[in-house]
Image (spheres, rainbow, N blue to C red):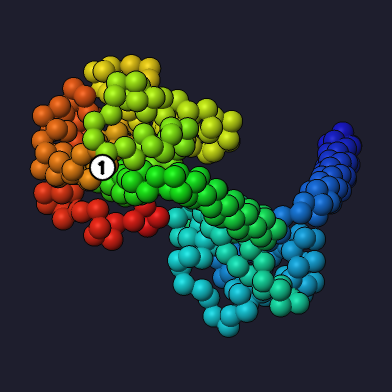
Amino acid sequence: MAEERSHDELVRRVADLEEELAECRKAERTERLKSEARLNAILGSVSDHMSMVDRELNVLWVNKAAINIFGDDIVGRPCYEVYRGRSEPCEPYPCITLQAFADGASHSHESVLLTREGKRIHLLATANVTSFNACGQPETVIKVCRDITERRQTGQELKTSLEKLRKALAGTIQAMALTVETRDAYTAGHQRRSTALARAIALEMGLAEDLVDGIRMAGVIHDLGKISIPAEILSKPGKITENEFNLIKDHPRTGYDILKNIEFQWPIAEIVLQHHERMDGSGYPRGLKGEEILLEARILAVADVIEAMASHRPYRPALGLDEAMAEITSKRGTRYDAEAVDASVELFSRKGFHFDSGWQAGD
């Protein structure tokens, strides 16, 4: 009898344990469903388009944002059909989903897709593996797509506005240059030719495009300050007096004062102020030395000297290009920036640069 009671108790105990286990599984299932519901609610509120696909590229799950864009019949269909309107898989590149399945890594790219209404949208997409099979191969991939259509449109509008501003700025600079030209044709021609050479030197030195643009903008008005010098002095034939030369030497400061309150994207006013400074401190108006002088001003200084010496002036005939090159090479690294001098020699001796060869400041 004792053995029978013991057996019955064991049976009841097993039944109790099975009931408890069933309750636990039920609770786990309920909690899992709640967790899935919470997760779906969270993912459903995300504005990014999200979808999960299997190794056969069939869509297993999508969030509400994706349904709103591509329709509610996405699940179960091939992703290339849903998102690309294709009847067969895409090429591995640039398909980031296939790349993720191939190497298990995260991949991103920008793409253009068609919505169910036929609207083109720009997306920034990222694909990540979410599970692996027993062999360690990627089993599912989730793809998250952010709509950047508005950002792209805004970026294009900003680019257009910046281009308009650049053209307006160039027009303002040109107007300033013409102001000088109406008073002194020699100065105006000198500014144009010096700018062409300074820009060519900067390009030869391999400088960034933005810096080259700054040199070009400053170059076409670097003698703007001469507007304050009486025209009879600028066009005076023969030797000028010391007082007249001192007056001329004020033109970098005058140009700086005219330009200093204009908010250019380049240090135009400082370049204009410094274009007569010299590496050894012998220049004017501040006697700056070496690296104290802006690189743009050092380049413009070399171009300025070459053009001025090579061209005719009311107070003297042209000294010629040979003498101009002898001047800058003999004082390379002392008065003039060594790299700018080397670039000038390269341009004239090996690359055929000359002031009327079609090298334009606006190229």
Q: Is residue 63 left or right of residue 194?
A: right
Residue 101 in the image: above or below residue 200:
below
> Is residue 92 or residue 246 the one in the foreground?
246
What residue is drawn where x is 27% and y is 42%?
A: 314
On the image, which quarter does residue 69 sit in?
bottom right
Q: What amino acid is found at the position of numbered circle 1 in the picture?
A: Arg
- Quadrant containing the N terminus is top right
Residue 362 in the image: above or below residue 234:
below
> Is residue 217 or residue 266 the one in the foreground?
217
What residue is drawn where x is 28% and y is 61%?
A: 358
- Quadrant containing the C terminus is bottom left
Q: Is residue 118 visible?
A: yes
> Is residue 308 or residue 286 the one in the foreground?
308
Q: Secondary structure at mark 1?
A: loop
Q: Is residue 131 visible?
A: no
Q: How many C-alpha atoms fall within 10 Å of the one at disc 1: few (<14), some, or many (≥20)?
A: some
Q: Is residue 353 left or right of residue 15?
A: left
What residue is drawn where x is 23% and y is 45%?
A: 312
What residue is drawn where x is 43% and y is 32%?
A: 229
Residue 286: image x %, image y %?
38, 17
Residue 179: image x %, image y %?
49, 46
Q: How many marks?
A: 1
On the image, numbered disc 1 is attached to which residue? Answer: 313
Residue 37: image x %, image y %?
84, 51
Residue 128: image x %, image y %?
57, 52
> Is residue 185 or residue 129 the one in the foreground?
185
